[in-house]
Image: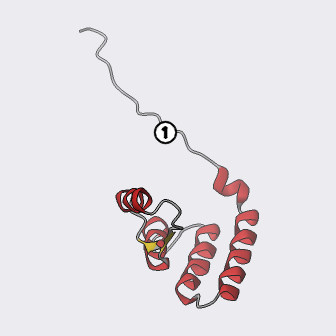
Amino acid sequence: MYCDGQNGLIKAIKSVWFNTKIQRCLFHVWMNVRQKLTLNPETQAGQELLCLSRKLLKIKSIEHANNWQSKFKIWNDKYYEFISQKVLILKLVKFDLHM
């Protein structure tokens, strides 16, 4: 079954049809990519991922899907170190020492 990936819908489907395979529709995947990357990514990794992600909407066969997955794996391998980096943001709080 294809859906937009909403957790409530997925839980409802699985509660009725236990063994149903669920796949997010490519349009909603593309919309999430646009939201996260924007249409003007600043990094080379983001630019390449956006270009690759645009091809999602053109997949029409298993062969195209397999080809896309291969290209995504190449992208993932190329930028593995970059996408594994995490940032820790600390919120600085001022305390009045005289209270």
Q: Position of residue 5 (x, y in %)?
A: 43, 65
The residue lying furthest to the top in this view is 98
Q: Is residue 79 above or below residue 52?
A: above
Q: Residue at x 40, y 30 (%)?
A: 92
Given the current orientation, which residue lies at the most extreme left position?
99
User: Disc 1 designates what residue?
Assistant: 89
Estimate how packed mark 1 is, as few (under 14), some (14 to 19) or many (20 or more) residues with alpha carbons within 10 Å. few
Q: In this view, does 46 lie to the left or right of 2?
A: right
Q: Tell me: 89 left or right of 95.
A: right
Give the residue type that dot 1 points to. Answer: Ile
Question: What residue appears at the point 64 percent right and 70 percent down from the top-left corner?
Answer: 44
The residue located at (76%, 64%) in the rendering is 77
Q: Which of 74 and 4 is in front in this view?
A: 4
Taking 12 as reference, is 30 above or below it? below
Residue 86's place in the image compared with 32, above or below, is above
Q: Residue at x 67, y 87 (%)?
A: 64
Q: Residue 18: x percent and y percent?
A: 49, 59
Residue 19 image point, x, y percent: 53, 62
Write down the quadrant of residue 46 in the picture. Answer: bottom right
* Element under disc 1: loop
Name the spot of residue 14 as percent of width and height, x first.
Answer: 44, 59
| Residue 11, above or below 78 | above
Q: From the viewer's side, name the closer residue of 2 and 39.
A: 2
Count of numbered badges drawn on the protein: 1
From the viewer's perspective, tell me whether residue 77 is left or right of residue 91. Answer: right
- Considering the image in quadrants, where does the C terminus appear? top left
